[in-house]
Amino acid sequence: MKVIKNEPLPNKVECANSLKNVLDALYVLNGKWKLALILSLVQSSKRFNEIQQELSGISAKVLAKELKDLELNDFISRKVYPTTPVSIIYEATGYSRTLKNVLGELSAWGEQHREKVKLSMRKQS
Amino acid sequence: MKVIKNEPLPNKVECANSLKNVLDALYVLNGKWKLALILSLVQSSKRFNEIQQELSGISAKVLAKELKDLELNDFISRKVYPTTPVSIIYEATGYSRTLKNVLGELSAWGEQHREKVKLSMRKQS
DNA sequence: GTAAGCGCTTACCTTTGGGTAACTACTCAC
DNA sequence: GTGAGTAGTTACCCAAAGGTAAGCGCTTAC
């Protein structure tokens, strides 16, 4: 049920909440790479070098750090298969998949944003 | 139409694209505050000090920098009203509103994430 | 045995982010 | 004229993020 009376402060609490939610989300998903890394592993499990190739630009050091971080936060798991030599496969957990909608929206937005930037570049030149 | 034949590389291109999109999106939306700032101003236009109070923790320096950055990227506009003394109001542009879905999903995710963290804290103790 | 690939780690360095505190320029209220 | 509020700016500093390059322990291929 909606409140019908005049609200002096129209759903102020709701706004503050969504602000807090976004801040909390950004707290775990901070940094240049985390969301992209999660997306990459949601699309398919990969080994270290494969990830590094896909996310061109990321250094081994940063990738190792981010992977540890994401594992700690239960977004990915590191599986070691006893082949010779051992295969180390990183895979997304179910919890990563709860980000599916976020990633979907972000990708859609990123695409149209790139278009917009392209257009404004053209105007400028 | 979908391709029916066996795809040796199942929609690899699509995956790479969405990865690129996400990376592009993160490029403009980087940092601790930008998305929260945009959300705050989408909810309602505000003045400098009001924003600073709402995003508790942000310093004047960083807020000023972020606001300039967002204005440059056409997410917000700075309006000066010739009252005495002048009122300076920051408002979200239409372009900020294209982030509505992203922000909605992020807020929803942030909320359930907080719940999950709370639970796992309880288990640990 | 030598090179090359995998999955990192380490040391070193630069850049950026971001905080504090002081200060400015303006106006209004007292 | 003193104090408070608004909207910042400036100088200074620290910590974290992130890049580069080298190396390590392992194994397989030549």
Image: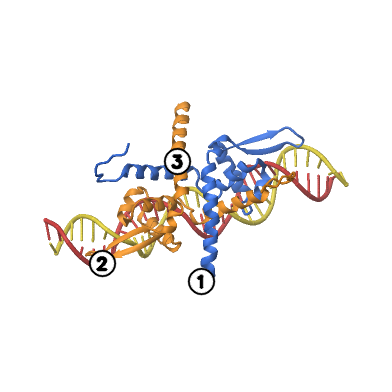
Chain colours: A orange, B blue, C yellow, D red
Tags 3 and 2 both on a single chain: yes
The amino acid marked with disc number 3 is Ala
| Chain to which the residue tagged by mark 1 belongs | B
Element type at marker 2?
loop
The circle on residue B81 is: none
* Residue B65 visible: no
The amino acid marked with disc number 2 is Pro
Locate the C terminus of chain B by quadrant: bottom right
Answer whether labels 3 and 2 touch (C-beta < 8 Å).
Answer: no
- Residue linked to disc 3: A108
Residue A28 vertical placement versus A110 (above, below): below
Q: Which of A115 and B106 is in front in this view?
A: B106
Q: Provide residue B64's location: percent of width, then percent of height.
A: 61, 44
Q: Which of A46 and A9 is in front in this view?
A: A9
Q: Provide residue B97's location: percent of width, then percent of height.
A: 56, 38
Mark 3 neighbour class, 10 Å CA radius: few under 14, some 14 to 19, many 20 or more: some
Element type at marker 3?
helix
The image quadrant that residue A110 belongs to is top left
Tags 1 and 3 both on a single chain: no
Q: Provide residue B119's location: percent of width, then percent of height.
A: 53, 66
The amino acid marked with disc number 1 is Gln
The circle on residue B124 is: 1
Q: Provide residue A38's location: percent of width, then percent of height.
A: 41, 53
> What is the spatial separation of the Cα atoms under label 1 and label 2, in whole angstroms?
31 Å
- Residue linked to disc 2: A82
On screen, residue B52 versus residue C30, left or right, reads left
